[in-house]
Image (cartoon, rainbow, N blue to C red):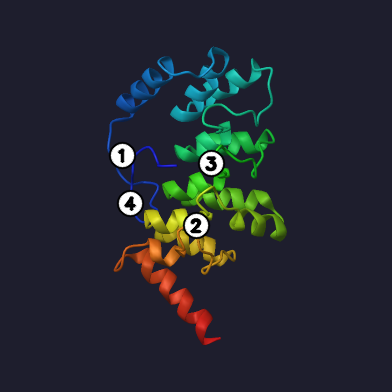
Amino acid sequence: MPVPDGRRDGGHEDAAPLFDDDVMDLAVEDDIDNSEIPLHLRPLVSAAESGDLNALRLALENFNGGIDEPMEDGDTLLHLACLYGHLNCVQFLLGKGASLEVKDEDGGIPLHDACAGGYTEIVQLMINHANEPERVKRMLETVDTEGDTPLHHAARGEYGNVVRLLLAHGASLTKTNIYGKTPTELADPGTEARRILEEALSAVSSN
């Protein structure tokens, strides 16, 4: 799933946004108002996409469904908060028991979305929250419908910090997607992400 701002900044959360926050918020609200999202889900989706923690808290208090209920395109609230890079909302949702391993309609877990956006702090938070080596391993090995792992997404976006973090936790360098591509092959030559991946491959080969 594409990230909202289409950044390729090496994984820096403080990169300047392409659009003014107020403009983005209005665009999000307009999209929701004209979408096919059921009315009772719109306050939740709007809050998760805009990063309005108070609105998200209030919407959840007035919501009769489960926290992992699909909102749109199979995305849960945690998927959306990760996709739009809202660390505060991710922290809140995890504290409320949101699942780290729930899948959207493309087979992706929230970690896929965080890696696709280059949100290093969110990726680290979710790995820490998993709290069990086997669970972390399972998350890192989860593939979406195109066979991409979270590392594939980070490599494609050329987010060096995220790539480095995933490798430190044991992400596979050799896993291929349905197109036969490894994460290394998805990062453009000469980028930091490609260099990190190639150095990791060399280290593995020399052992």
Spatial CA distance of label 4 from label 1 is: 12 Å
Nearer to us: label 3 or label 1: 3
Nearer to us: label 1 or label 2: 2
Nearer to us: label 4 or label 3: 3
Q: Which residue is mark 3?
A: 106
| Frontmost residue, 72 versus 87 | 72
Give the amino acid at mark 1.
Pro
Residue 130 pos. (x, y %):
67, 51
State whether residue 88 appears in this view: no
Nearer to us: label 4 or label 1: 4
Q: Which residue is mark 1?
A: 17
Spatial CA distance of label 1 from label 2 is: 32 Å
Relative to residue 16, is residue 135 depicted above or below?
A: below
Q: Indicate which disc residue 8 carries.
A: 4
Q: Which residue is mark 2?
A: 178
Q: Earlier in the sequence, mark 4 or mark 3?
A: 4
Q: Are marks 4 and 1 in contact (CB under 8 Å)?
A: no
- Say which residue appears at 49% left-offset and 81% top-offset: 203
- Say which residue appears at 69% left-offset and 17% top-offset: 64
